[in-house]
Image (spheres, rainbow, N blue to C red):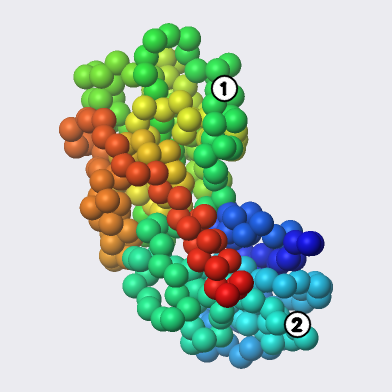
Amino acid sequence: MSKLKGILLTQGMHGMISQVEGLAKALDIDFIHCKVETNNIWKIIPPKFTPISQSIYKKIDQKNFDIIISCGRKSVIPSIHLKKLSNKNVINIHIQDPKVDLNHFDFIVAPEHDAIEGENVISTKGAIHYLTEQEIYENKEYLNSFIKKDNRKIWTLIIGGPTKYYDYSTKNIKDIFSMFNNLLEKHDFQLVVIPSMRTPTSTIHYAKKFFGENQTIIMNVDKKAYLSALAISENIVVTCDSSSMISEAALTGKPIYIANIPPKKNDKRFQRFRNLFKELNIARNLGEEVEIWNYEKLDETNRVASIIKQKINS
């Protein structure tokens, strides 16, 4: 039996790509990724005020598909419109709160901290993503040629980047790095610093200067280095701006510390996410007492895919 065909719609941001591709792989469908580009003033108009029309977005020249998986504000209207245009019984799935009538979609996959409810809503603990345990394991040895050859245990700092909620000012980054210096004085570990696609070049160069040659700073975005670090680390630290990378780290079952940055504006939604992970004993704040603890590995992507498969086949 041939696989179902899917199109994935996002604005091209890493966190969104991780979620749509992760779900597509877990559903075991063939897929292509289409970057959504909206036209003119519609780039700034919220979906609930936007007509469901081809005039809103640049044409997506794909016709043979069974499933649409979309993520992000700009992909809401294209997903609804493409489903309406199709002469097939297309299933459309939106990840995150679409902020329109939920009945436009067959499934909504949204984290609990989005606080939306509906018969077609599947709530998740954190963000779904495209990482798998097998992929992490297969890349375990990748950092061997980067890390210092000694007996120190590994801590990894995964750095996100500035958002409308969090500022990557020199002071904020220095405060996080200084907390690590305090930890390094008390606990003899090797620090591995991993940048992401949003990490400013200035931040990673500052890390190199701040920590010196005795720690391992990965200077460029490198997925294999990221996976390897998750595999070899005893403790994982992630900056608070990235719910996606905190969720990805939770697949390891290893202690996660959150490096907090003072918010520029109300970040209650993200606070709810972090509080949930603390209640689940997955994460704690960087600066709290260093401990080793265990929790059940969080694999929401495959759980969501199982629910969708069951409903499609019923």
Please state which of residues 210 and 246 is positioned toward the viewer in this rendering: 246
What residue is disc 2 on? 88
Q: Quadrant of residue 43?
A: bottom right
Q: Quadrant of the C terminus?
A: bottom right
Q: Residue furthest top?
A: 150
Please give left or right for residue 86 compared with residue 297 in the image: right
**In the depicted structure, whether residue 94 falls above or below residue 230:** below
Per the image, label 1 sits on a secondary structure element best described as: loop
Q: How many marks?
A: 2
Image depth: mark 2 or mark 1 in front = 2
Mark 1 Cα shell of 10 Å, populated few (<14), some (14-19), many (≥20): some
Q: Amino acid at mark 2?
A: Lys
* Image location (x, y in percent) of residue 213: 45, 15
Q: Quadrant of the N terminus?
A: bottom right
**In the depicted structure, whether residue 14 falls above or below residue 42:** above
Q: Amino acid at mark 1?
A: Glu
Q: Earlier in the sequence, mark 2 or mark 1?
A: 2
Q: Residue at x 54, y 31 (%)?
A: 137
* Image location (x, y in percent) of residue 209: 43, 24
User: Marks 2 and 1, how far apart in space?
Assistant: 46 Å
Mark 2 Cα shell of 10 Å, populated few (<14), some (14-19), many (≥20): few
Per the image, label 2 sits on a secondary structure element best described as: loop
Q: Is residue 40 in view?
A: no
Please state which of residues 62 and 160 is positioned toward the viewer in this rendering: 62
What residue is disc 1 on? 141
Please give left or right for residue 144 compared with residue 153 in the image: right
Q: Is residue 232 in view?
A: yes
Q: Residue at x 41, y 62 (%)?
A: 124
Q: Residue at x 37, y 58 (%)?
A: 125
* Image location (x, y in percent) of residue 159: 44, 41
